[in-house]
Image (cartoon, rainbow, N blue to C red):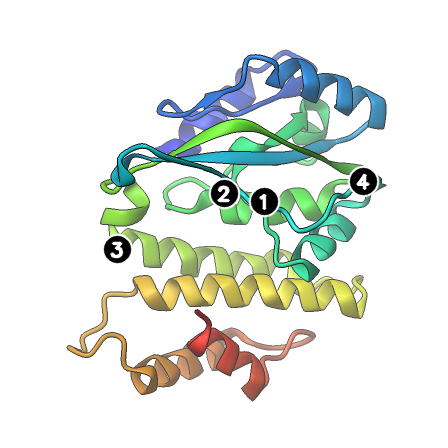
């Protein structure tokens, strides 16, 4: 279990900062030095940075992600989260986050074990708690994508992981009535993204899996069961979930 392994690492870490590297990926040789200097300069709890993607299933195709804007300041975590989503940018992977160890320990920021997509939930927990978050607009990590990786092959576990993330986001965050309208809209967009992923990974009983009516009915049932209090899903929100490309 990736989450359990990372938690063991967090429990045993002794350094000032923490960086995750998955076993089939690699970082640039200057990554740690650049991240450490930037974290110290900005006094950040967490520094986000960019990825280079290596697609093994496309004959080793390499591409850098396209980031719309630069984010040169230091922000509350929720503020940076909101700016990311206003720009259709999301840096959810744990491997692109350089973390102050005391920030992790003091806020009990450990991974939810037993699910796939634990990064999605961990990302929200960090954003909620980070008093100082910054962004280093450089690609420092090479992220290997494989056609037979866990996210591509285990559809049932994948769908359960997304639903677990959605339920925990509501339980841990949405009920906190402390965010601005813009921040709550960013949360809504994030949940829409998780719902979209859930709907496309859910093993439907229907043969026409891509039928929009099937997905729309299923989405209405899911949303009506847990959508409450501050963040309400309108018909327009539902349409974005069902028909997003």
x and y percent of residue 85 in the render?
66, 58
> Of the residues tagged 4 and 1, which is closer to the observer?
1
> Residue at label 2?
119
- Work out whether mark 3 precedes mark 1 in sequence or the reverse, and give the earlier one: 1
Report how far apart the C-alphas of labels 2 and 3 lie in the structure. 17 Å
Report how far apart the C-alphas of labels 3 and 1 lie in the structure. 23 Å
Q: Residues within 10 Å of mark 3 (few under 14, many from 20)?
A: some
Identify the residue shown where x is 26% and y is 55%.
155
Comparing 187 with 110, the one in front is 187
Q: Residues within 10 Å of mark 2 (few under 14, many from 20)?
A: many
Position of residue 78 in the picture relative to residue 190 (left or right): right
Q: Quarter-wise, where is residue 100 in the image?
A: top right
The number of callouts visible is 4
Identify the residue shown where x is 61% and y is 53%.
89
Rendered-image quadrant of the C terminus: bottom left
Position of residue 18 in the picture relative to residue 56 (left or right): right
> Residue at label 1?
91
- Work out whether mark 1 precedes mark 2 in sequence or the reverse, and give the earlier one: 1
Callout 4–callout 3 Cβ contact below 8 Å: no
- Residue 22's place in the image compared with 123, above or below, is above
> Residue at label 4?
131
Instruction: Identify the element where label 3 is drawn.
Output: helix
- Work out whether mark 2 precedes mark 3 in sequence or the reverse, and give the earlier one: 2
Report how far apart the C-alphas of labels 4 and 1 lie in the structure. 17 Å
> Residue at label 3?
155
- Work out whether mark 4 precedes mark 1 in sequence or the reverse, and give the earlier one: 1
- Residue 158's place in the image compared with 203, above or below, is above
- Work out whether mark 4 precedes mark 2 in sequence or the reverse, and give the earlier one: 2
């Amino acid at each position: 279990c990736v989450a359990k392994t990372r938690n063991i690492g967090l429990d045993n870490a002794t350094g000032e900062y923490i960086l995750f590297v998955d076993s089939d990926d690699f970082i640039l040789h200057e990554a740690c030095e650049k991240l450490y200097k930037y974290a110290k300069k900005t006094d950040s709890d967490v520094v986000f940075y960019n990825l280079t993607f290596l697609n093994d299933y496309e004959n080793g195709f390499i591409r850098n992600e396209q980031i719309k804007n630069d984010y040169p300041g230091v922000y509350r975590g929720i503020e940076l989260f909101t700016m990311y989503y206003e720009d259709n940018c999301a840096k959810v992977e744990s491997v692109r986050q350089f973390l102050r160890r005391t920030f992790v320990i003091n806020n009990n920021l450990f991974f939810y074990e037993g699910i796939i997509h634990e990064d999605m939930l961990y990302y929200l927990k960090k954003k909620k708690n980070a008093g100082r978050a910054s962004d280093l607009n450089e690609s420092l990590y090479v992220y290997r994508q494989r056609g037979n990786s866990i996210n591509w092959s285990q559809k049932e576990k994948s769908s359960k992981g997304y639903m677990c993330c959605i339920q925990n986001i509501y339980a841990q965050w949405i009920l906190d009535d402390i965010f601005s309208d813009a921040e709550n809209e960013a949360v809504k967009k994030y949940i829409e993204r998780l719902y979209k992923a859930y709907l496309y990974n859910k093993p439907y009983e229907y043969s026409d899996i891509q039928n929009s009516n099937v997905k729309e009915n299923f989405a209405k049932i899911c949303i009506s069961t847990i959508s409450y209090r501050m963040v309400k899903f309108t018909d327009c929100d539902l349409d974005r979930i069902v028909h997003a490309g």
